[in-house]
Amino acid sequence: MNPIISRMQKHPKFADFFLPLDEKTDVRDATYFLRQDGTFCFSEGYCHEPQLPLRQRHLVSHIVFVPATGQEFPDYAKKQIFGQGYENLTKGIMNTQPLHMFYPLQLTRYLQIDPSLDVEKPLYAKYKAMIPMDSIIGHFPQRRALRAIFKYGEAGDRSALEIKRSVEASAGLLGIMPEQFGISGSLSIGTYQNPHDLDVVIYATVKEVRRIVDFLYKLTATDEKRRVFEFGKYWPIRYWEWVEGKKFMFCPFFSYINLDECPLRDFTCEKIADVTLDARVADHTHNAFNPSILGLDRVSLNGKRYSGDLKLILYHGGERGDYVEGDRVAGNGTHVLIRTFSGSGAARKQSGQYEAVLCTNIGDVHKSV
C-alpha cells in the first residue's frame, strides 16, 4: 500500500467519503477515483469499456490531484486531502493558459506523470487518460459525499452547514428534493472547508433535467446577479446562490438517475472524416450532460448541404449547457459513425446506429450568426 494512502485511510473522515472498487461499482461521469499511486482521477462520461470485466477496463478520465513532491508550485494549486499535501494539476493550467489549451496541456502533464498512459485511445478520449481499472482502489460517490457533509453540518460544522443550507436553497429554487443532489469536485474528497464554488451533481430523469436547464437559461438571462463569468467565459447554467448573506457559485453537473436513458453508456465510434461543420441546434434535451448530445438540422459539412440526420457530440465537460435549440453552431470536428449497444456479456447486442460530428476540445465549435 502506498504510504500516502495508508495515512489518508487513518483520517477520521476518509471512510465517510470513500468506497472500495468492486464489480458492482456504478461508473458515472464526474466522479473521483483513487489510484494505487495516490493520484486522484476524475471520470468523464459513462462509457468505460462496459463490455469487459471491471478489472480489465480502462477509466476515461483526467488526473487532477497528485501527491506533493516538495517542488514549488503556486499556492492556488495546493490542496490538503485527508491531511496529505497534494498539487492540483488543473488549477495551474486554468489560471495561466487560454481555455482551449486546457485539455491538451492536461494530457501532456498526465503523460509526464505516468508515461504508461501513452496508449491507443478511442476517438472520444483524445485528450483524456485511459486509466487501468486494476490501478484503482476505490471511488468517492457523489451522493455519499454530500450525505457526509450534511451529517457534519447537522453536528455543528460551520462550513458543512453552509453547504447544506445552500443546497437546500438551490433545491427550492429548482423545484427538486435535496436528496437529488450529490457533490463532485474537491468537496467530494473531503476538502469542503470554506468553499467558494459547489460542483453539485443533480440526479434526475432526462425530462426533469430538461426542465431545470430551461429554467436556468431564463434565470441567468433575466437576473444579472445570478450570472457567472469565469475564465473569460459566460456559463449559462451556472448560477450564484446566497445563504445568510454568503455567496456560493453553483456549477451543476447532471447525472442520469435511470441509466437506461443515457444515450452513450455503451458505444463504439468509427471515424469517417475530419470536417468543417455549420448547422442549427434542433434538440438540446441532452445538452447539460457530459457528453453533451445535440440534435442538428440545416447542416452543412465542408460547405456542402448534408441531407441526413446528424448529431453533435461534445465529449468534454467544458461546454455543458452552452447550446440550445435555435443556436447556430460552426467549427471543426470529426464525422463519425456511432454504434450503440445494450445488454451485457453474451446478451450484449447492437441497439442503434447513427452519424455524428464529434468534438473533443473546448472551442472546436462555437455559436455563429
Image (cartoon, rainbow, N blue to C red):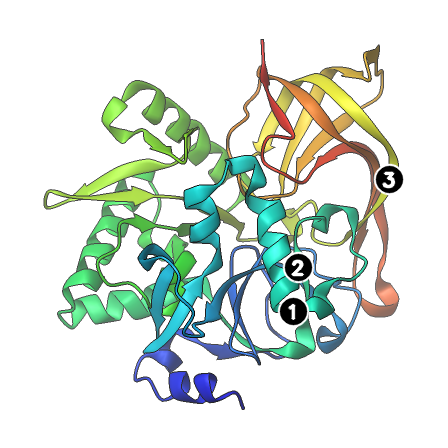
| Residue displayed at 54% across by 77% down | 138
Q: Indicate left or right for 80 with 56 as reference.
A: left
- Local packing at callout 1 (Cα closer than 10 Å; few below 14, some 14-19, many 20+) is few
Q: Is residue 319 visible?
A: no
Verify CB contact (< 8 Å) between mark 1 and mark 3. no
Q: Which residue is mark 1?
A: 114
Asked if residue 311 is positioned above or below residue 105 in the image, the reply reads above
- Local packing at callout 3 (Cα closer than 10 Å; few below 14, some 14-19, many 20+) is some
Asked if residue 276 is positioned above or below residue 120 in the image, the reply reads above
Q: Indicate left or right for 287 with 91 as reference.
A: right
Q: Earlier in the sequence, mark 1 or mark 3?
A: 1
Q: Position of residue 224 (x, y in %)?
A: 26, 22
Q: Nearer the viewer, mark 2 or mark 1?
A: 1
Compute the Cα span from label 1 to label 3: 28 Å
Q: Which residue is mark 3?
A: 271
Q: Position of residue 309 (x, y in %)?
A: 80, 24
Q: Which residue is mark 2?
A: 129
Q: Residue most toward the top?
A: 369
- Local packing at callout 2 (Cα closer than 10 Å; few below 14, some 14-19, many 20+) is many
Amino acid type indicated by mark 3: Lys
Compute the Cα span from label 2 to label 1: 10 Å
Amino acid type indicated by mark 1: Asp
| Residue displayed at 46% across by 84% down | 5
Q: Indicate left or right for 261 with 183 as reference.
A: right
Toward the viewer: 155 or 11? 11
Assign the C terminus to one quadrant of the image. top right
Q: Position of residue 345 (x, y in %)?
A: 83, 69
Q: Residue most toward the front?
A: 72
- Secondary structure under tag 1 reads loop
